[in-house]
Image: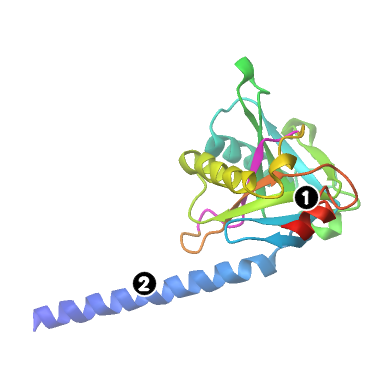
């Protein structure tokens, strides 16, 4: 009798875990519709990467100069951005959360030519035209994007120091075999960026992306129409 009771309890616990997991998956699926995010046009797609043109947009940036770890830099930068969106700005405005949180690698900007980081928060649509100014002690600054042509590779799980370089290398390899092979080496501010779309409390169905700018800065964001047609 005791063994049957224990087995029944175990089954109930497993069913509860499955139901909870399904709820988490549904929440993750709905996440992209609950938050503002930067608008883009998909111009080319392959099995392992895609090319997007992101539209003009305003972001808030947290430079991080004292960390050589992607994970620590992201925590440092987002902590300051979180204070900003919770009201640490000159208007004392609460700023709604958006996705993704973008951590960009700034090559050779640190001591001994090491990399530094910049954590970026996409400003909600209602604040795009006039973002609240951050309190000076947060060391944040607005950044205004022109149209940008960006190559994107998706990956799952948590974005960590041990896997982001691998994912960036995979994207670089894919691009080296594409029509954009000669358009990834032009001078740009960031080597690559990691876009994270989920809360740290999400463990299932996580979505991350590696972003690399390609092309120049023309009206199409550098996505030359002749390249798109020939790909």
**Kind of element beneath mark 2:** helix
Q: Is residue 16 left or right of residue 168?
A: left
- Is-magenta flag for residue 131? no
Residue indicated by mark 2: 17
Residue indicated by mark 1: 149
Pointer 1 local density, CA inside 10 Å: few below 14, some 14–19, many at least 20: many
The image shows residue 18, relative to residue 94, as above or below, that is: below
Front residue (pair 213, 142): 213
The image shows residue 104, relative to residue 34, as above or below, that is: above
- Is-magenta flag for residue 200? yes
Q: Is residue 64 left or right of residue 41?
A: left
| Residue 159 screen position, x and y as percent | 52, 47
**Kind of element beneath mark 1:** strand
Res 55 → quadrant: bottom right
Q: Residue at x 77, y 43 (%)?
A: 60
| Residue 74 screen position, x and y as percent | 59, 40
Q: Which residues are magenta?
A: 189-201
> Marks 2 and 1: CB-CB under 8 Å?
no
Q: Residue furthest top?
A: 112
Q: Residue at x 43, y 71 (%)?
A: 21
Q: Earlier in the sequence, mark 2 or mark 1?
A: 2
| Residue 3 screen position, x and y as percent | 10, 78
Q: Is residue 152 left or right of residue 122?
A: left
Instruction: State which quarter of the image contains the N terminus.
Output: bottom left
Alpha carbon distance from label 2 to label 1: 42 Å
Q: Is residue 229 visible?
A: yes
Q: Is residue 60 left or right of residue 205?
A: right
**Of labels 2 and 1, the one closer to you:** 1
Front residue (pair 163, 183): 183
Q: Main secondary structure of the magenta part?
A: loop
| Residue 185 screen position, x and y as percent | 72, 35
């Amino acid at each position: 009798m005791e063994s049957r009771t224990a087995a029944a309890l175990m089954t109930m616990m497993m069913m509860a875990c499955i139901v909870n997991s399904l709820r988490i998956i549904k929440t993750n699926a709905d996440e992209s519709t609950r938050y503002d995010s930067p608008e883009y046009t998909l111009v080319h797609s392959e099995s392992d990467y895609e090319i997007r043109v992101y539209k003009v947009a305003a972001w808030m940036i947290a430079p991080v100069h004292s960390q050589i770890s992607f994970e620590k830099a992201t925590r440092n930068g987002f902590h300051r951005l979180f204070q900003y969106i919770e009201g640490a700005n000159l208007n004392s405005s609460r700023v709604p959360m958006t996705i993704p949180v973008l951590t960009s690698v700034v090559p050779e900007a640190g001591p001994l030519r090491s990399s530094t980081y910049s954590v970026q928060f996409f400003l909600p649509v209602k604040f795009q035209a006039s973002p609240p100014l951050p309190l000076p002690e947060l060391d944040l600054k607005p950044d205004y994007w022109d149209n940008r042509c960006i190559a994107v590779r998706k990956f799952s799980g948590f974005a960590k120091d041990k896997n982001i370089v691998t994912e960036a290398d995979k994207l670089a390899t894919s691009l080296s075999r594409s029509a954009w092979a000669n358009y990834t080496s032009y001078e740009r501010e960031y080597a690559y960026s990691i876009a994270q779309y989920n809360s740290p409390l999400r463990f299932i169905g996580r979505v991350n992306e590696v972003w690399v700018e390609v092309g120049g800065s023309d009206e199409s964001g550098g996505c030359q129409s002749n390249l798109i047609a020939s790909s």
